[in-house]
Image (spheres, rainbow, N blue to C red):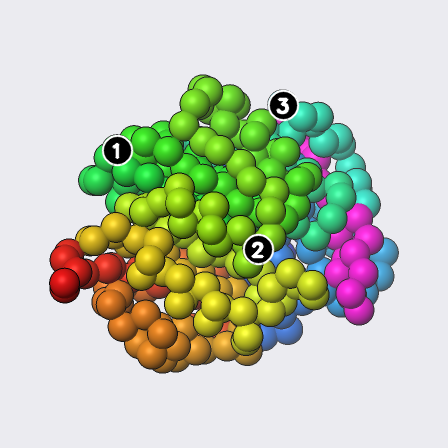
Amino acid sequence: MQALLQAIATMDMPLDAQRIFHGRGGLHPGCEQWALDAFPPVLLLTSFEPVTDDTLSLVHEALNARWQQLAPDQPLNWVFQCRHEGRAETRLMVGSVPEPHVVTEQGARFRVHVLKGQNHGLFLDMAEGRRWVREHVAAHPGGKVLNLFAYTCAFSVVALQAGARHVLNLDMSDGALAIGKQNHPLNGLLAGASFMPHDIFKTWGKITRMGPYHLVIVDPPSYQKGSFVATKDYARLMRRLPDLLMPGGYALLCLNAPELDLAFLQDQMQELAPQLTFEQRVANPAVFADVSPERALKVLVYKASDWTPD
C-alpha cells in the first residue's frame, strides 16, 4: 500500500469533491483494492478487500500527519468503507460528518452522504462529463435537456447554471430524485427543472411529447437487476435517440462497465442510430487513469444530423 501512503503524504488541501488516489485503475501494483476520495471536509477511504485494524492504523497515521501539515487548525474527519462480496460496511474513523453534507465542484454545490450506501450522491469519475455539459450548454444556451437515469441530478444543475431553458430528469429512485430536487435550490435554481420518478422504458410517450431535445444525457447503471442491464437495454435507448433529438442536437452516452469496451457502444450506435455521428470521447479526470482505457468509464458525444430528409 506504499503508493496509497505516498499519495496521502503529497496530497494538496482538497477544496472541491475529488478522488485523491485510484488504485482500481491498476497503475499502482498492490494497491488495486484502494480508493481515497475527498468530500470536504471529510476524507473517504474505500477498500474492496477486507483489511486489518493495523492497516487502518497505518492509514490513520499517514492522514493525520499530512493533515497537521495542511490544516493544523482544522479537525481531521475520515470515514472507512469496506466493500466485499456485495456488502458494504462503513465506519466513521475519526472526527465527524456534517449534516447536511454539501460539497462543491466547479462552482456547483451538491448534497452527499458518505456514511450510508455505496453511492454517495456525486460520482466523482463523471467530473469531466459534467464539465463537458457545462461548456456545451454555455455554447448553445436556451435549449431543452433530457437527463435519463438522473440520480441526484448533477447534470441538471450544471446544465441550468450554464443556460439551459429546461431539464427533464428521469430516474426510478424517488430517494435520488429527492436529493436532486434539493440540489437545485442549493444552487439558486428555482425554476427550469422537472422530475419524473418513472421507469424510463414505460414512459417513452411522455418523454417524446415533451421533446424534442437539444441534448440527451444517458448515464445508466451498467447492471441493476429489474431496472437496467447494459448488454440488453442500452440498445433500446439508442433506437430512441433519433426521435428524441432536434436536428443538430447532441447525445452524451455514458457507460461504467469494465467488461464492455468502446466498441460495445460505437458498433451498436452505428447500427441502431446511424443518423448520429460520433464526435469525441470525453477524457476522464486524470486521477482516474486506467492501465486499460477500454475498461475505464466511457463518455461519448454524438451529434444528430443538421437536417432530416423528406
Left or right of residue 215: residue 192 = right
Q: Position of residue 23 (x, y in %)?
A: 58, 65
Q: Position of residue 34 (x, y in %)?
A: 65, 62
Could you tell me if the residues under marks 2 and 1 are in contact, i.e. CB atoms within 8 Å? no
For residue 251, what is the image quadrant? bottom left
Q: Residue furthest front?
A: 310
- Whether 82 is among the magenta residues is yes
Left or right of residue 40: residue 301 = left
Element at badge 2? helix
Q: Which residues are magenta?
A: 74-90
Instruction: Give amino acid for label 1.
Output: Gly
How far separated are the C-alphas under marks 2 and 3?
Answer: 53 Å
**On the image, numbered disc 1 is attached to which residue?**
142
The answer to whether one can see residue 14 in this image is: no
How far separated are the C-alphas under marks 3 and 1?
Answer: 45 Å
Most foreground residue, 127 or 173? 173
How far separated are the C-alphas under marks 2 and 1?
Answer: 28 Å
Secondary structure mostly taken by the magenta-highlighted segment of the chain:
strand
Element at badge 3? loop
| Residue at the image position 64 percent from the left and 61 percent from the top | 227
Left or right of residue 304: residue 118 = right
Instruction: Give amino acid for label 2.
Output: Lys
Q: Residues within 10 Å of mark 2 (few under 14, many from 20)?
A: few
Query: Which label is found at residue 202?
Result: 2
**On the image, numbered disc 3 is attached to which residue?**
73
Q: Residues within 10 Å of mark 3 (few under 14, many from 20)?
A: few
Observer-side mark, 2 or 3, equals 2
